Structures are given as C-alpha cells and as structure tokens.
Image: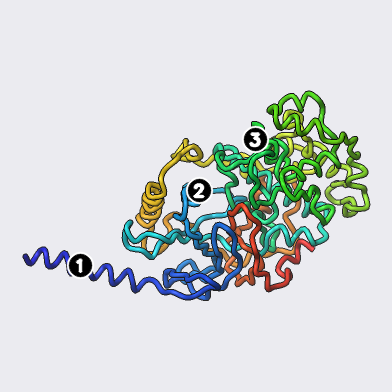
Amino acid sequence: MDAQKAVIEDFAMNKNKREREFYSLDVGDSTFTVLKRYQNLRPIGSGAQGIVCSAYDQILERNVAIKKLSRPFQNQTHAKRAYRELVLMKCVNHKNIIGLLNVFTPQKSLEEFQDVYLVMELMDANLCQVIQMELDHERLSYLLYQMLCGIKHLHAAGIIHRDLKPSNIVVKSDCTLKILDFGLARTAATGLLMTPYVVTRYYRAPEVILGMGYQANVDVWSVGCIVAEMIRGSVLFPGTDHIDQWNKVIEQLGTPSQDFLMKLNQSVRTYVENRPRYAGYSFEKLFPDVLFPADSDHNKLKASQARDLLSKMLVIDASKRISVDEALQHPYINVWYDPAEVEAPPPKIPDKQLDEREHTVEEWKELIYKEVSEWEDWTKNGVIRGQPPPLGAAVIDSPPQPSSSSSSSSSANDVSSMSTEPTDPSSDPTMTSETDSNLDSHTSLGALACCR
C-alpha cells in the first residue's frame, strides 16, 4: 500500500514539475504554451501550417524561432504533413538546410496531445526581401551556389522538393542561406486539370504544373525562376492559376516541341495543343545586360555566364534541362565549390515509405507523439545532445571570397547560422506551408548590409 502511494505521489510530483516547466501567452489569435527556457516571444510570421515567434533560448543562449503547428490533427493532410516535416527535420543535417534545435509538446499524454512546437535556427530575412536589393555577381552566385548545395543534399536523401520559392529560403546578414521546408509530398502534387487550390505556382516546373512524371532536376527549374526574379526584380511567370501559369511560361519561352507534347496525357495534351503557339523570346531579350550588375573584375563573373546558366535551367523539357550536379560545375557557380559542402554525407531517412504512408488522423497523431517523445528522450538537462555550443557574432561585411581551393573555400565559408547576436527578424524563418507566408515585417533590412 505504501509503495502504491509512493508511486502516485511520484507521478503527481512529476506532473506538477512538468506543468511548472511551461508558461502560456497569447500571440496574435493563438496561445503559445512553451518551455520557460524560451523568453521574449515575438510574432514574426504565419501561414497555413503554423504561427512562428522569435524567442531567446536561455539554455543555448541564442535567439531561435519557435513554430507552433497549426491544428496538426484537423485532417489527414495536415497530420501527414506535420509527421513528414518532423521526421525529415530530425534526419537532415546540412548547413544549407534549416536546423531543428528542439521539439516539444506541453501536453502530458497521448490522450491530451494536440500541440506540436518546433524550435529552429533564427534567420534574418527570407529571399523575398533580398530580391528587392541590388546584388553584385559575388553575392548572387554565392546565394545560388548555396541553394544548389541544399537541394543536392535533399536529393541525396531521396527528397525532391518541387515547391521551392523565395518565401521558404532564408538568409542571414553574412549571406549564408538555408532552405526551410521539404516541399510537397508525392501525394500532394496537383496537375493542370485538377481542382486548383491556393498555392504559389510561380516557381513550379512545367512537369509539376502539367501533372507529368518528374526527376531531380524539377527543382532546378524553381531555382532558375528564383534567380530570374533576383535579376529582374519581378516574378518571371506570374500565373493566377495552373492554366494561366502554363500560358505565362510558353508566352516567354515559346511553345515546346511536339516530342515534349507527346509525353503529356491525352486530356492535358489536347488542352496544350489547342493553345495559341508562341515563338518565345531569346534569353538576351528576356535578360539584357542592363538588368545585371557590372561584370566582376576580381572573380571574372559576368552577366553572360549568369544568362547562360539561366538558359540551361529554364528549359521546359526536363530531359534537356541542366542537372543540379551540372549547375554546380557551371563557371558562374563553381568558383565556390567545396567538396565538404557539395558532397556532404546524405541524411539517413529511416522511413523509406514516408510519402506513400496513409493513416487515419488518430494513427498519425500517435506516430507524431512517438516522434516527440523520442526527441525528449534524446535531450539531457534541456540541451540537445550533440548540439554544438553557440558561437559568437558571425556577421561579415561580404560573402566569402571564391576559391578554387577547397581548403580556403571551406575556411572562408565556415560561418555558422547560429549567431548569438540579437536579431530583429523580418521574416518567417520556418514556414513550410503551401501558401505564401504572411509576414509581420516590422523591421528594415539593415542587418543584410552585405547583400546591398
């Protein structure tokens, strides 16, 4: 009897202790219930998949971003997306992919479980804001190089993104870049004639728009659209829906060959063949020299090189489009090439059928609770095991200088995104939604002086 009483008292004590570890506060229309180690919460973004706050982590002694997943168990689609995001973030470890620092829930049992909080690195801005800046060739090519390194690492794990866009790519003031999310699950893709839903289609490859099969270089198209926007200062293909998106593409690049059209399923091909035919424009006309910064005497980077790379990325027929590996070897990019970054060991994804899994909401809930519980088991004294200590301020006035030597490139490029300098965030550093993030941008971009 005494033993049983002791167990009950111990359970009650642990429950009370757990409750004391958390506190709640209202953030906009939502209530955040977070560990007490996280202080000074400020809202910085929201979207279909969650609300994000900046906070100061008193244990790691650094600023972080905390994302509260928005009603993750409201339906199977949301639950699957939450599970996929959590599993992949736990596995992927690359300097150009956003890092997961912690995951927790304030609920004490599976029965009560309803909220998931992800704690991640805090960045300074997303690429939407950088697009408005005038970049020289060094910064433009360095940002492009980092995008390609991050994409290559995802591909090595069998993750093909298919939904890259400026709002899910973030930067710090030292021009380091990270990809936020893991794109569309295979089951989430839509084709031209399917029911449209509210997403940003501007950067999606033709094979995604048209509901075709795809390969890894589907992401190269998206990068090409993003770089084109950085050069032009405006969206290259601003379609209002899937059909208009396709029209915008062919109006500028021209109607593709009959060989390509024969790859489409019959209903889509009939639609495409009935559209007016367009000759398209040359890349010299789409991207004249006047849009580019002055050629770089120091690093020999030229507008003609950037335009050549764009012409190889923005190819409608994926079988003729440049690959990620080929893009990394392009003269406009390979000045930054560092094998340690390009050829980093691929992440080991334990669930090989992640995108094909189908479960009930309750089953997804149990799987997510198990993942959160496992993470909590990995922690010790509130600090993630294996997490490097926070570094000092790592802000520099310019990006690392290109080098053909991997050793010098590595030393110049070994800048942690884990700066402990207080930041005044002006972007959502952790959005993974299929809609554009709705940012509460209340600061200037003075922190991104190196990218001006």
Q: Residues within 10 Å of mark 2 (few under 14, many from 20)?
A: some
- Res 77 label: 2
Res 408 seen here:
no
User: Looking at the image, is mark 1 or mark 3 earlier in the sequence?
Assistant: 1
Seen from the viewer's position, the closer of residues 311 and 305 is 311
The residue depicted at 41 percent of the width and 74 percent of the height is 23
Q: Helix or strand or loop: what does disc 2 sit on?
A: helix
The relative height of residue 300 versus residue 356 in the rendered view (above or below) is below
- Res 216 label: 3
Q: Amino acid at mark 2?
A: Thr
Q: Picture coordinates of residue 62 (x, y %)?
A: 53, 68
Q: Residues within 10 Å of mark 1 (few under 14, many from 20)?
A: few
Q: Amino acid at mark 1?
A: Asp
Would residue 180 be found to the left or right of residue 317 on screen? left
Q: Tell me how far mark 2 sits from mark 1, CA to CA.
A: 39 Å
Residue wearing tag 1: 10
Q: Tell me how far mark 3 sits from mark 2, CA to CA.
A: 24 Å
